[in-house]
Amino acid sequence: MASNKAARIGEDVWKSRTEKINTEIVTLTYGTIVSSLCRDLLLPNTTSTTDYAAVNAELDRMGYNIGLRLIEDFLAKSNTGACQNLRETAEVISKTGFKIFLNITPVVSGWSSDGKSFGLVFEENPLADFVELPDDGRAQEELWYSNILCGVLRGALEMVQMQVDVRFVSDVLRGNDTTEMRVTLLKYIEDEMPPDDE
Amino acid sequence: MEARIPSIACIGVIGRHNNPLHISLFPAIGPNSTQEPRDKLAFTFMLNSSLDIFEARMPSKTSQDFGLLHALDERIALYGWLTNTGVKLVIVVDMEGRIAPTPEAAKIGVLGLRGGDLLPAFNALQTAYVRLLQNPFYVPDDHDPKLVRGHRALEIQSPKFIREVERTGQAWYPGIVTI
């Protein structure tokens, strides 16, 4: 029910109210960002060994900044009201959010038993078209290429009072069968009163 | 004596500064379907000598397909393709490289190769090269001998590209439309 409505909204907005851009420009730009980070963020005291953990953290931080701003654009374009629960949130993210901005609809699956965590399985990932991870033995184990998406979700959800932990658990670039992202709700953020009052 | 048809013996990708980026060899199928390996050094020399032909014909040629560069002897012929960025794709064809699977195919072998027969192979190679360039972790400058300092492998390492080249070389036969 909610997913059909979310899908319909996503489809409408994608068709009518978004400016389109060539996908290769997005792929190449994102690729340059990641490979620049890999060249610049090196392990201390080495000249050319990349610190992939730092690259992942930096991509997440960049995504976080994007997410904080993107949520306003999303709410304005899609006109959805507040979601009642996490399930509705998951459907809106996958059918409306990703559809509007990347024209993909990851599949929501793998709900945990307490209902606080779900997985998003990406059948296609436009950011990672034609990418092959570098062959230095460690990139395959340590780099999450599309980590910026985790940051975007984290930042966007924080602006709607949800604190979440988002991380990739598998990636086809690493040789796994699917690309899957795990979203876990940590808590709802209550607005806090400023410390001083009259 | 079984009828034989041409097959690709070697594919070479050469950069704009005449530096070899990749060389793939494909064994000939000898009598009784044994595989005869190719001599890498001999083919490297062949590719090297074909570079002169590119330079000699460069001013007059307007299109990208250089067609038949040079027929070495009755068996070996070299075909070339120059991209706008100066990267050269060279395919060495062995006229008796493979046993004809069907009598129809054998007739093609007798007629010889036409100019457009290698076009699908060159298109497939060019597509593979374009895909390689779209990989953000492939830095073309790292394979340029004039820009690289120090000792690093100058040839293309990407497994996807190498796989695609091998697939093209093995799948080609005269008259194929797309690879």
Image (spheres, grey):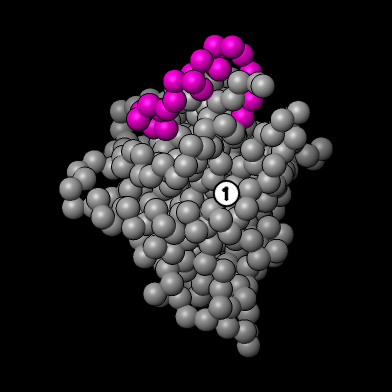
Q: Residue A121: percent from the left, percent from the top?
A: 64, 37
Question: Any magenta on residue A157?
Answer: no
Work out whether B167 lies above or below A52: above
The magenta segment is: B98-119
Farthest right residue in view: A113
Name the residue at 47% across, 68% down: B142
The answer to whether residue A113 of the structure is visible from this angle is yes
Answer left or right for B156 relative to A115: left
Label 1 residue SS: strand
Which image quadrant is residue A193 in? Answer: bottom right
Question: Any magenta on residue B107?
Answer: yes
Name the residue at 35% across, 30% down: B115
Which residue is the site of mark 1?
Answer: B24
Count of marks, rendered view: 1
Name the residue at 47% across, 66% down: B143
Q: Disc 1 sits on a residue from what chain?
A: B
